Image (cartoon, grey):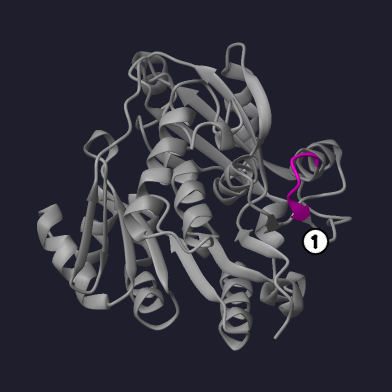
Amino acid sequence: MTDTLYDVLGMGNAMVDVLAHAEDDFLAGLGLAKGTMHLIDEDRAVDIYASMGPGIEMSGGSAGNTMAGVASLGGIGAFIGKVRDDQLGDVFAHDLKSIGVSFEVPRAVEGSATGRCLIFVSPDAQRTMNTYLGAGRGLSPADIDPDYVAAAKVVYVEGYLWDTDVAKAAVLKAFGAAHAAGRLTSLTLSDPFCVDRFRAEFRDLVTNHLDIVFANEVEIMSLYEVDTFEAAVEHARREGKIMVLTRSEKGSIVVRGEETYAVPAEPVTRVIDTTGAGDLYASGFLYGFTRGLPLDECARLGGVAAAEVISHVGARPGVLLSTLV
């Protein structure tokens, strides 16, 4: 077996986040549904960026945020994603490497610019994301080194990658390499609209390719096309996998067959920005899991990481998470 070098290897769209505050009527004026993620083209990205007020720019992307959280907890991580050899690509690579996350995928030398996500934070802390995937759409099987994948205990993939066929092929290659090496695979469903687009494929992934699944309340109900969370839990239970289900202020529930672990949310003095809550929950859970902790303790660590990130603007930790656990 390949030596273990990493706790978690994340795969996702390599993005630079731009965050700004916005009122509900401003979002309506741009034709944006609050609290959702919209895929946009480069022209739309330019128009939306021009309309934004003062903001904060930082490296992001769902799986990238999760890997930042793993590193902040003291774990060792790696990341697979595609950027261009441009300024934002330099920023993204530098940010990951500066926090100790391995990033070895060669940068694209032609084609689309590095991706960016334009995020509006509403007064009620909801986030509305407008994502230009850019170079991230070019992630392909050629970027997957089976030995690199096999060096991680768990491979963690964001569901957003399912939006391009070439990235799907890359993910399946990574899952195959992981299982061939006796490693585990995991996926976050990412967004209810993502589930709506790929429900049948996601259900096949859960049944045939995954060991751990992350979903929030709305996503898991959409996956199984049921009207109640309780019904979704029963469907999830029958998968026999580790199903990690988050419920915002209600905490989270983890099921594995007949096992059930209900863990309350961690206290938060004030919710500022929910961007990255699910990403950082996954950080805490996977950090605990790769250390062999019980599933309820993994869920508690997920809650600690999520509570920290929603207490400030931005989708990455504001303090070292290792000091909180």
What range of the chain is rendered magenta?
A: 98-102
Residue that numbered label 1 is attached to: 105
Image coordinates of residue 44 in percent, x first then y, are: 59, 35
Q: Is residue 173 above or below residue 233?
A: below
Secondary element at tag 1: loop
Estimate the x, y position of residue 247 in percent, counting from the top left: 26, 43
Quarter where residue 243 is shown:
bottom left
- Work out whether 62 lies above or below 31: below
Q: Chief secondary structure of the magenta span?
A: loop
**Residue 5, percent across and down?**
73, 66
Q: Is residue 100 magenta?
A: yes
Residue at 77% across, 55% down: 102
Give the quadrant of the N terminus: bottom right
Q: Is 245 contained in the magenta span? A: no
- Give whichever of 43, 117 is nearer the camera: 117
Residue toward you, 167 or 320: 320
Residue 237 on image: x %, y %: 21, 70
